[in-house]
Image (cartoon, rainbow, N blue to C red):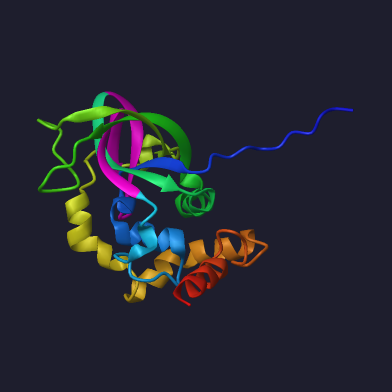
Amino acid sequence: MAASTQTSYPDTHTAFFYGTLMARSVLHRVIFGPSASDPNSTTLHNLSFAPAILPNYQRHKVIGADYPAILEAQQSTVRGTLVRGLTQGDIWRLDLFEGDEYERRKVSVRELKPSHKTDLPSLDGDEVLGEVEAETYVWIMGENTLESREWDFDEFVREKMWRWVDGEPHAEEMFGELDEAVKQADPTRGRGMNGDITKALQDAKSAS
């Protein structure tokens, strides 16, 4: 009789985000769902953030969308945010959020010393702290679905992010498919270890 095998998952994940998820309010909404509290609260306290560079990839704007994609490209670099401390439940929701347009892959990124001015440093003159293995989402829908120009994070924050955050009419449309997918795929309906109900119960217990 063959020995049974069991999938092993790391306790936490490290991810490199280069698009809308660099905005903590968007990342917070994806991880914690529609009942998420203020993203500036302590709910993200288990995560750490650092600027980073991903070598040999290039970022493009997706045609007709607010978000970007990356493809392998020699001699190119992508700057973004390195996030440590993500749980398996967080990764599960992030996979649903990214959908079938992206594939999660392991990459090596260069962690940078944070700038006093911005979390997204320029590529020139930044001190590299070291190489870090992380996971990121790579576009798999073909180059013909992308614009040639670079996606601009500052432009997204200034002109588009209002569509993605709670409190705006478009926000629930933007995240509605994710929320429904979570409900359909989670047999516990939020009552599991990483579910919204469990988190609410834990928060209530801590407050009592």
What's the magenta bit mostly, secondary-structure-wise?
A: strand
Q: Is residue 6 visible?
A: yes
Q: Position of residue 175 (x, y in %)?
A: 43, 65
Q: Residue at x 66, y 38 (%)?
A: 7
Does residue 44 belong to the magenta stretch?
A: no
The extreme right residue here reads 1
The answer to which of 63 and 56 lies nearer the viewer is 56
The answer to which of 129 and 186 lies nearer the viewer is 129
Q: Quadrant of residue 84?
A: top left
The extreme top residue here reads 74
Above or below for 141 versus 191: above
Above or below for 169 versus 189: below
Q: Residue at x 24, y 45 (%)?
A: 151
Magenta segment boundaries in residue numbering: 48-74
Q: Residue at x 37, y 42 (%)?
A: 145
Q: Is residue 64 visible?
A: no
Q: Quadrant of the N terminus?
A: top right
The answer to which of 61 and 182 lies nearer the viewer is 182
Q: Quadrant of residue 38?
A: bottom left
191 lies left or right of 179? right
Q: Position of residue 147 (x, y in %)?
A: 28, 42
Q: Quadrant of residue 55?
A: top left
Does residue 67 belong to the magenta stretch?
A: yes
